[in-house]
Image (cartoon, rainbow, N blue to C red):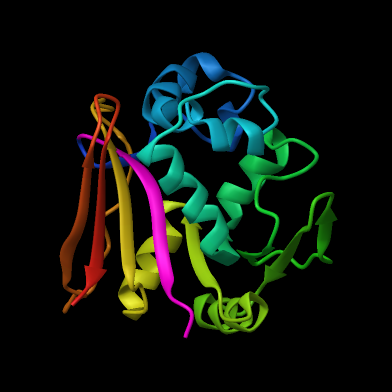
Amino acid sequence: MSKVFVNIALSLDGYMAPEGMTLENWDRPERWAAQWGALMAWALDQQYLREKLKFGPGGETGPVNDMVRQTFERTGAHIMGKRMFEGGERGWPEEAPFHTPVFVLTREKREPWTRPGGTTFYFINDGAESALALAREAAGGSDIRISGGADVIQQYLNLGVVDELEIALAPVLFGGGRRLFENLSEPTTQFRIDRVLNTPAATHLRYVRQ
């Protein structure tokens, strides 16, 4: 059976996104881009991701690069929130970097949006459980990645359906922004450490549900 997993980068003080990284400030990157770039520097240095995003040749190879490749190869469907989609709609290249069905939690009614390279966005108006059921069907036995943002990940943690948490803990401090582990209901799902991969740019932590 397919697994539901979260794979995200996190600042040392627990934030997924810095203060000011909002749709309203998207065209004012001086408010957020430096912090976001510091959080994601480890990923953007990997050869596989550079190729995926069409950044050109080069990049690091090795265990982190292999881990990034595995994340993409295991994923048969993505789920994200409206806020993440709207930011990506402005910032992603024409060939969005998912290459799977993507289910967007939103109140907006909108027809599916197909991009080159196999990505189609579906806009789901009836909640997180409905989106997960559709993602399971679309994934065809592959795994389902809960891409973000923080509110969407919290919804799935509260449903108790997240099987794995993969966190790249970057040595940066935001001091504010969107926290990952807020608004969680009791009792919370318990996880155990499955893998730790240390690099100077980030500590990669993998937790699996007990």
Q: Is residue 31 above or below residue 181?
A: above
Q: Which residue is at the front of the view, 171 or 70?
A: 70
Q: Main secondary structure of the magenta part?
A: strand
Q: Which residue is at the front of the view, 71 or 209?
A: 71
Q: Residue at x 32, y 66 (%)?
A: 164
Please state if 148 lies on the left or on the right of 84 as rendered.
left
Place of residue 7 in the rendered image (x, y in percent of width and height, measured from the top left): 40, 53
Farthest top residue in view:
30
Please state if 156 lies on the left or on the right of 172 as rendered.
right
Q: Residue at x 54, y 31 (%)?
A: 47
- Residue 11 placement: quadrant: top left
- Residue 29 placement: quadrant: top right
Q: Which residue is at the front of the view, 62 or 130?
A: 62
Queried whether the magenta region covers residue 6, the answer comes back as yes
Place of residue 113 in the rendered image (x, y in percent of width and height, measured from the top left): 82, 58
Queried whether the magenta region covers residue 138, the answer comes back as no
Place of residue 91 in the rendered image (x, y in percent of width and height, measured from the top left): 67, 33
Q: Residue at x 51, y 82 (%)?
A: 129
Span shown in magenta: 1-12
How many numbered discs, if any? 0
Q: Residue at x 24, y 24 (%)?
A: 200
Q: Is residue 115 above or below residue 88?
A: below
- Residue 9 placement: quadrant: top left
Q: Is residue 17 above or below residue 171?
A: below
Q: Which residue is at the front of the view, 58 or 184?
A: 58
Quadrant of the image containing the C terminus: bottom left
Place of residue 88 in the rendered image (x, y in percent of width and height, measured from the top left): 65, 42
